[in-house]
Image (cartoon, grey):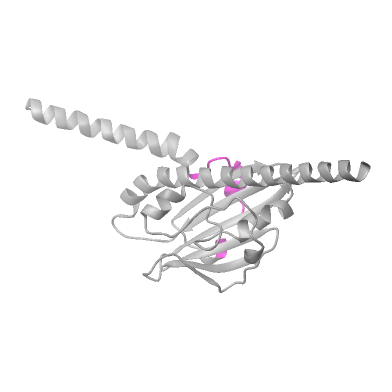
Amino acid sequence: MSRRGLVALQAGLAGLLAGMWYFKMVRPRVLNWGATADEVERAMPGDEILPDARLQTTRAITIDATPEEIWPWLVQMGPKPRAGVYTYDWVERRLGIDIENSDRIMPEFQHLEPGEFLGLNEKGEGLEVRVVEANRALVVQWIPQESTWAWVLYPEGDGTRLISRNRLAYSGAMFWPTMAFMEPGSLVMERKMLTGIRDRVMRHRGEGANVGAREAVGVAG
């Protein structure tokens, strides 16, 4: 075998081993960041929309707040003039989505109904609202892609588990090569979203406590 052939063989074997390592050791953590084994396996609102989904991610975070304190930040999400999705909005704008994250609860966007459509661009792409269960679950479906995105709240102890689940039914020759590129990127964006929601909820909670303390001092005076 020529030197060039040997180098190509070694490179191919290295790539194969790297791919096996990613799929066995890294990919499960990428797809299910923060989620327990029970949460990964649990049936959740919206799963029935795409029962034959080829890909599912389940990512989660604990927030030291009640579902009622978290829900206002979920229900107002969406492109302008709505509240964004609390991730890297500059990335979203580079993708052609007119979006800007809000750091406040927006009273004008505290109500959604199944069937509402949140347009993302001039191509007619967007999110169709499929499930709205106040203080429990919000599910949207990407249009025209065959994918869903659900946010579900589960009380746990003194806090709440916020779970974000994506399901994708896309097929085609480029499905897995595309996913190998998209999966790590989706984790970066979604982790930022989950921590962004948590930070806003806790900051808002702290501001409310400070206002209450000031009012109490005022009354006592």
Q: Position of residue 20 (x, y in %)?
A: 36, 36
Say which of 109 and 65 sits in front.
109
Instruction: Tell me if I can see residue 80 in this picture.
Output: yes
Q: Residue furthest left?
A: 2
Q: Residue at x 58, y 49 (%)?
A: 41
Q: Position of residue 157 (x, y in %)?
A: 77, 42
Q: Residue at x 84, y 46 (%)?
A: 215
* 218 shown above or below 126: above
* Quadrant in the picture for residue 203: top right
* Quadrant in the picture for residue 73: bottom right
Magenta range is 31-48
Q: Residue furthest bottom?
A: 115
Q: Residue at x 70, y 58 (%)?
A: 135
Residue 39 as seen in the image, left or right of residue 166: right
Say which of 192 and 155 sits in front.
192
Q: Position of residue 38 (x, y in %)?
A: 63, 45
* 45 shown above or below 19: below
Q: Residue furthest front?
A: 221
Instruction: Tell me if I can see residue 45 in this picture.
Output: no
Q: Residue furthest top?
A: 3
* Quadrant in the picture for residue 156: top right
Point out the image quarter for the C terminus. Answer: top right
Point out the image quarter for the N terminus. Answer: top left
Q: Position of residue 218 (x, y in %)?
A: 87, 44
Q: How many marks?
A: 0
User: Does 40 appear in magenta?
Assistant: yes
User: Does 85 appear in magenta?
Assistant: no
Say which of 178 and 28 sits in front.
178
